Image (spheres, grey):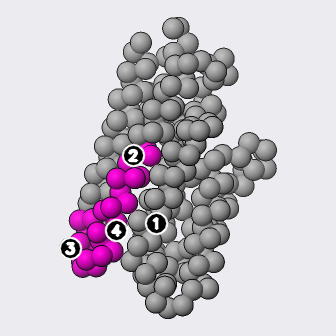
């Protein structure tokens, strides 16, 4: 299929992954800041999510991941400021697990409609390939891959929140999730390279 090479660009900048990582920035910020203050983490993430979503909303081309991020942090911010101290402490311990779970739901949920990676890939791929089986199949696989990565992070974050130690935090909140993210990036790159080689 001659157009297939255009469905799988060779690096993060041209494949639209840069845009996806920008869209994930509020989640990263929340994960870091929530360890110290859930309220501050949620507020910063909400402001960032709105700022990131604004251009696509203004262009009337909203992206599933960006909209879901705004809605998620509206809810998390409201909970952080309205819940009692004990509930906020619970939220602080399990915030990363909640965030990873929500991301997994967004990723897998988008497979029912338009895979969330496809919305970013369309910004760079030629319009003529958007409806091709190869383009759609690649993005379904990429989205499912990231859904699995996010889902695999959930038990790690739950374990970290349960044991609540410095070593547990380093291993289960950072070490294993970072390894999963690296695997996801390598897997995504391999899938794109394989599609381009066909």
Q: Earlier in the sequence, mark 1 or mark 3?
A: 1
Nearer-the-camera pick, 42 or 143: 143
State the residue lying farthest toward the front.
112
Q: Is residue 44 above or below residue 148?
A: below
Mark 2 in CB contact with mark 3 (< 8 angstroms): no
Q: Residue at x 37, y 41 (%)?
A: 185
Circle 1 residue = 98
The label number, if any, that marks residue 167 in the structure image: 3
Of the two numbered discs 2 and 3 in the rendering, the one whose residue sits closer to the viewer: 2
Nearer-the-camera pick, 112 or 46: 112
Q: Earlier in the sequence, mark 2 or mark 3?
A: 2
Of the two numbered discs 1 and 3 in the rendering, the one whose residue sits closer to the viewer: 1
The label number, if any, that marks residue 148 in the structure image: 2
- Say whether residue 156 is magenta: yes
State the residue lying farthest toward the top.
2
Q: What segment carries the magenta color?
A: 146-172
- Could you say whether the residue bearing mark 2 is in a helix, strand or loop? helix
Distance, label 4 to label 3, CA atoms, is: 14 Å
């Amino acid at each position: 299929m001659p157009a297939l090479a255009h469905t799988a660009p060779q690096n993060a900048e041209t494949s639209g992954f840069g845009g996806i990582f920008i869209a994930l920035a509020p989640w990263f910020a929340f994960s870091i800041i929530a360890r110290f203050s859930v309220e501050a983490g949620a507020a910063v993430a909400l402001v960032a999510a709105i700022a990131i979503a604004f251009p696509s909303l203004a262009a009337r081309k909203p992206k599933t991941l960006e909209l879901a991020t705004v809605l998620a942090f509206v809810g998390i911010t409201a909970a952080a400021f309205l819940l009692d101290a004990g509930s906020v402490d619970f939220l602080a311990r399990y915030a990363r697990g909640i965030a990873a779970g929500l991301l997994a739901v967004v990723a897998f949920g988008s497979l029912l409609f338009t895979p969330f990676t496809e919305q970013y890939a369309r910004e760079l791929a030629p319009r003529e390939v958007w409806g091709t089986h190869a383009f759609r199949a690649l993005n379904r696989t990429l989205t499912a891959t990231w859904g699995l990565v996010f889902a695999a992070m959930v038990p790690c974050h739950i374990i970290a929140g349960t044991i609540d130690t410095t070593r547990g935090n380093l291993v289960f909140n950072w070490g294993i999730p970072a390894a999963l993210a690296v695997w996801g990036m390598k897997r995504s790159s391999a899938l794109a390279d394989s599609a381009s080689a066909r």
